[in-house]
């Protein structure tokens, strides 16, 4: 029993080290090139600037439009980031190296998931204060921040898996949004509804169903991706 426990602990440590190594590789590469974050940030800021100049709203209506604008910005910037993240791996030949590494394939998935999540959260941390200034709206609501975190996890969990499939295609820039948005629609809908509830100070009993959808979605699709990622990258 003790020997088996020690073996399991060693395997868990090796798995965690593999995941962290992939995350560190992506972060270090991005610090050198600043290619991915720059593209995501510029795109996100352009989107909220366009909305700011295109939509003239009364202060009382800003909390109504804010969830939709925020999640449109996050989803478009996130899709760009997911596409570039896997395309960089493919173009530099790093993806083949990762697949040949003596680690469980799911460690590659979780490593890419966490690095993509970090990039998306960095963009959101920058976008939120800019949006708050442009729209004169207070976005520093703990409930809203929780929704953004849960929505981002679900978005990246599915997006990382689908971008691994789309990267093999020549039309990957077009294929990923086509595959991603129908699958991610429940997350976007629940995130917009929950965000609007917190911004409009709605009762928690009306917000909890949307939060539950986000939590269940994150858990279920992370588990599905964990099980099928090996088959996806083999194809």
Image (spheres, rainbow, N blue to C red):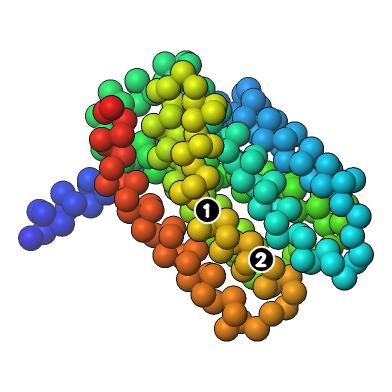
Where does the N terminus fall, quadrant-wise?
bottom left
Tell whether 192 sits left or right of 187.
right
Q: Residue, x 92% and y 64% (percent of image)? A: 58
Nearer to us of marks 1 and 2 is 1
Q: Using the image as rendered, state which of residue 128 and residue 200 is in the foreground.
A: 200
* Sequence-first disc among 1 and 2: 1
What residue would you read off at disc 2?
195
Tell whether 126 sits left or right of 53.
left
Q: Residue furthest top?
A: 92
Give the Cα separation between the discs numbered 1 and 2: 15 Å
What residue would you read off at disc 1?
185
Percent x, y of residue 157: 45, 48
- Label 2: state its secondary structure: helix
Where does the C terminus fall, quadrant-wise?
top left
Q: Is residue 151 visible?
A: no
Q: Residue furthest left?
A: 1
Is 132 located above or below residue 83 in the figure? below
Percent x, y of residue 213: 47, 67
Q: Is residue 72 visible?
A: yes
Tell whether 171 sits left or right of 101.
right
Tell whether 41 sits left or right of 121.
right
Percent x, y of residue 119: 59, 41
Q: Residue, x 64% and y 62% (percent of image)? A: 192
Q: Residue, x 33% and y 53% (percent of image)? A: 223
């Amino acid at each position: 029993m003790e020997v088996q426990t020690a073996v399991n602990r060693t395997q868990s440590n090796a798995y965690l080290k593999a995941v962290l190594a992939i995350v560190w590789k992506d972060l270090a590469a991005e610090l050198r090139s600043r290619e991915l974050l720059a593209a995501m940030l510029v795109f996100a800021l352009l989107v909220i600037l366009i909305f700011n100049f295109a939509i003239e709203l009364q202060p009382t209506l800003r909390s109504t439009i804010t969830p939709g604008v925020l999640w449109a910005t996050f989803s478009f910037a996130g899709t760009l980031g997911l596409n570039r993240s896997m395309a960089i791996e493919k173009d530099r030949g790093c993806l083949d190296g990762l697949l040949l590494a003596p680690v469980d394939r799911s460690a590659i998935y979780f490593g890419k998931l966490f690095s993509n999540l970090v990039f998306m959260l960095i963009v959101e941390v920058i976008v939120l204060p800019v949006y708050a200034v442009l729209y004169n709206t207070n976005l520093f609501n703990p409930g809203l921040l929780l929704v953004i975190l849960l929505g981002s996890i679900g978005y990246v969990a599915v997006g990382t898996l689908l971008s691994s499939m789309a990267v093999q295609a020549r039309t990957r820039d077009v294929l990923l949004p086509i595959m991603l948005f129908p699958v991610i629609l429940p997350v976007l809908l629940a995130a917009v509804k929950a965000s609007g509830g917190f911004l409009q100070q709605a009762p928690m009993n009306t917000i909890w169903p949307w939060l539950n959808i986000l939590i269940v979605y994150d858990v279920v699709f992370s588990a599905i991706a964990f099980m099928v990622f090996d088959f996806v990258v083999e194809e």
